[in-house]
Every structure is written in C-alpha cells, then in structure tokens.
Amino acid sequence: MRGRNLILATVASAALLAMPAVAQETVAEPVDVFAIPAQVREPTEAEFADVGRLVTEAETARGEERFDDAEAAAQQLVALASATYGPGHPVTASSRNILGQIAFMRGDLTTAESIFSEGLEIRRAALGPTHPDVAESLNNLSSVLSWQGRYDEAPAPLMQALDIWRATLGPQSPEVVEGLRNLGRAWIDLARYDDAMAAYEEALAIQTAIDAPATDRASTLRGIGDVAMMTGDYVVADARLTDSLRVLEAAGFEGLGLGLTLTSLGSLRDRQGRADEAVLLHGRATDVFAAILGPEHPFVAAGLENTSGAFAEMGRFDRSVDLQQRALQIRSTAQGSSHPDTSVSRRSLAATLLMAGRPAEALPIAELALADLNASHPDGLESARAELVAARAEFATFPDDPARALPRARRAQERLEPLLGADHPETLEARALVAEVMAASGQTQAAVELRVAVASDGVRRLGPAHPRALAHTQAAVGALEGLGRPAAALDLLRPVLDPERANDRGARAARRGVWRSAVRLLWTLSDPGA
C-alpha cells in the first residue's frame, strides 16, 4: 500500500471560517476588487445585487458540497460578471475561481489548472502581487500540482500564499490556518515529516488562540495524526485521529472531512493489525466520497484501495483483488494511465496479487509501476516502495533463482532507509526481504544476523504485540533454530512472551505461533542430548 493512498490528500477548504474577534497586528487594507473600474459597463443596482446573491449561493452550495448547485450559480455569476466587468476583470476571475474549485473537487485537473492560472495572472495584473486573492490563486494552484503528482513544485506557491496572507490578513487568519494545513500535506507527499508536523502544530496553535470551531480543528488534528502514523508513532496518531472523528460525529458532520478522517483512522487500524475494524472504516469513507463526488472520483478509488488492503490483511484475497482492479480503472480514466497516483494504484494491485499467491501476474504490473514512478519521481518515496514490491514479485516469480532478486531488494532498502529511517515499519519489510533472499541464495550466516537485527528493531519500534513485530521475530527464531542455536532463539522470543498480551486483537494467530516456538525451544533445551 502507499502513504499517499492511505492517507488522502488534503483538499482546499470550500468555505473559510469567519475570523473571530481577537487582537491582531495592524495590517494593510487589501484593494477592493469592486473598486477596479469595470471593463465593459458599470452594472445596474439590480445586477450588482444579483452578483452578491449569486456569490452567496455559489459559495454556500460549494461549502456544503452541493457541487451541482454551486456550479449552476457560479455559471450565472461568470456570465453576469463577464457582461459587465469584463472577462479580464478580477471580479470575473473570482467568479471563475469557484468553477475552478468545483472542477478540482471533481477531479478535472486540466480545467482547474487553466482557471487558476488565468485567474492568477488577472489578479496579479489588477490587484498587485501581494493581494489576498493572489494568494488564493497560488494556494489553489499548489493543490492542483499536488494532485498532478508534481510534489516537488507544490510547496513553493503555498509558502508565497502564506507570506501574503500573513501580511495582509494577519498571522491568525483562517486563510493562514488553511495554508498551513495544505503545506503540511505537501510536506507529507515529500516525506518531510518534521516539516509537516511543524505546519500542522502551528495551525492548531492558531486555532486554539482564536477559539476556532471544533469541527475546523478536527481537520488539523487529522493532519497531526497522519504525520504521527507515517512516522510510526501510533499512540499519538490514535489519540489525534480518534479525537477528530469524535468531534465530527458529535457535530453530525457528513462532509468530505468525515471521509478523510475515517480514511486516516482506517489506515491506522490496518497498521495496528486490526483489519476487521479497518474494513468498516474504509467502507464508510468510500460511501462518503461516492455520495458527494460520484462513483468515478479518485477519492472513491482511494477508498476502494484502502478497503482492498484491509481485506488482504484478513486473507480475503479475491475480494481484495477485485476492489483494487476497480480502483485502478477509476484512476486510469480520471487521472490518466501514467499519473503518479495511477502508478501507485498499479503498484498496490501488484502487491495484492502477491498476497493472493499470483506472483507471475504481479511482476509485470509492478515493473510498469516502478518504471513510471522512477520517471516522474526517481528519488521519491513512492518509487522506493515500488522497488520493494517489484523485488518481492521477482523473488516469488523465480524461486529457483533467488540471487536474481537480491540487487533489487537491496536497492529498495537503500532507497527507503534515508527517507524513513532504518527501523521504520516499511524499511523493516525491505530489510526482512533482503534477509530472506540472502538465505535462499545460500548466505545463511549473514541472513540470520540481519533477521535478528530486524526482529529486535521491530519489537522496539512496533511493540511486542504488533503482528509484524511477531512475524519478524518468528522468522529470526526459525533461522536461529536452523543454525542449531536454540538458546539464542529463546532469548529473542522472551520480549514478546507476555501472557497479558495473549488476547491482543489482530495478533492472536501470530502470538500462538510464538508460544508454540517457545515450547519447542524449551523442550529442545531440556533434552540433555540437544
């Protein structure tokens, strides 16, 4: 699975909150767009009233995620603004901006980028480079860049937007909060987790200072939970994501924010080995996205991918493959066959086929995903993850030639370590694969040493009850037994032999295997002839 897939990209807010009355720095009053002379003719009083009415209707419908109603009102608004203020006027650009945001939410990135780019030029020319509306266009363009997979380009316009908003609207404005949250998501896409956490925590501090509504803080809590999850701090992630969901449910909120929080919490449950809960959470999230955005939207694809992953963890591979194939179809149609998100979906399908015991089908799919991701983001996290899936597929497809997969497995480890750290759960998987391939290639001693190191790091990082930590421990124990070192194997087992954890959810089967190994080792060590 993927980071960005598990954790859906933050969407630009549809409606900004009103600024609470708090003490702020004195800031310059921005130019009023209606003070710019009309290019065609001055609207009549009735037309000016219609502009105000249509703006309210379009913004309200967009904020409530009624996109058909929002688009209808915005189209009328654009027609009226073009006929009076003119097509190159900032009022018309602001009117079209609503259409751009609707196109963005519906996954029509080409239309959205065109509208936002044109609006940026109009606003800069008419209002100057430091107007809040210019910052809005920069923010919107950053979101498009992110969704186009151009992650390296996304932070720069966001940071420009933040500078403008701080200078013109004040450092505690809702726009600054929104910009910080979007910047946090942009840093997550680049695996810059310290920067992402700093952005989210700054946003939360502002919201606390201005006593922002709880439902708005829920989005920031979700961002903090996402970063904590990506760095393996599941305690913090659980607390923040649970708080976010509780706030939204208590308020009866049923918008996209609910779907995003359900997605994040489902991803966390997956990583905690609680796949049965993850299936339900991801299923709810997918229903939310489909109800608001339609069944062919990339958000729905992401929900299907996440549900697929949870089913795979439960061993329901046929269901998992079906959902993953449907998700890939949606992404290919909506985003294009070579878009990074489509390539990541293709990689996820390969990983699912591997889990289903179909490596020969998985290998060409994984290699295509790897080639596309290496072309678009050669140093990125997603291409490193694709390297790992391709290595697994190659190893499983050619079991009689294990050395064939070793260079690719090592390359995956070498790419993941600097991005995530040596003891990150994903890096541990790469190191474990290297050990497995080495053992199959006859490098027994080195493989055992690596497996023991992975097991120790896994228990320390994930905890002694986590299914993956238990699996790494079991692999190392088996390797030590194979070398005739039962005492060393039993020592490795001791940290996970906690009777109080015997009924931990998601780890029962693995824990039973651990106890069976312990009994076998004790029996071996009690035999004088051993």
Image (tube, rainbow, N blue to C red):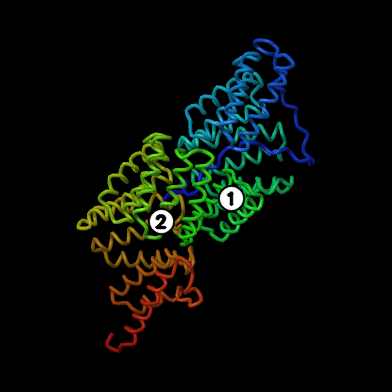
Tell whether 354 sits left or right of 98.
Answer: left
Which element type, helix, strand or loop, lies under badge 1?
A: helix
Q: Is residue 493 among what the camera can see?
A: yes
Q: Position of residue 180 (x, y in %)?
A: 62, 41
Question: Residue drawn at (46%, 35%), measured in percent from left and top?
Answer: 148
Q: Looking at the image, is mark 2 or mark 1 earlier in the sequence?
A: 1
Residue 272: percent from the left, percent from the top?
Answer: 48, 61
Q: CA distance from mark 2 to mark 1?
A: 24 Å
Identity of the residue furthest to the top in this view: 40
Dot 1 corresponds to which residue?
Answer: 222
Count of labels in the image? 2
Report the amino acid beneath label 1.
Answer: Arg
The foreground one among 480 and 41 is: 41
Residue at image position (65%, 11%) is 39
Give how far across and how far down residue 63 sits, in percent. Answer: 63, 36
Quarter holding the C terminus? bottom left
Question: In the picture provided, is 245 more to the left or to the right than 443?
Answer: right
The answer to which quarter of the image holds residue 519 is bottom left
Query: Residue 29, located in which quarter of the rendered image?
Result: top right
Circle 1: is it few (<14), some (14-19), or many (20+) Cα within 10 Å? many
* Residue designated by label 2: 311
| Outermost residue toward the left in this view | 400
Could you tell me which residue is drawn at 65 percent across and 41 percent down?
177
> Disc 2 marks which amino acid?
Phe
Mark 2: few, some, or many residues within 10 Å (few <14, many ≥20)? many
Q: Nearer the viewer, mark 2 or mark 1?
A: 2
Does the residue at mark 2 contact the one at mark 1 (Cβ under 8 Å)?
Answer: no
Q: Is residue 186 visible?
A: no
Relative to 516, 238 lies left or right: right
Vertical order, 57 against 508 (above or below): above
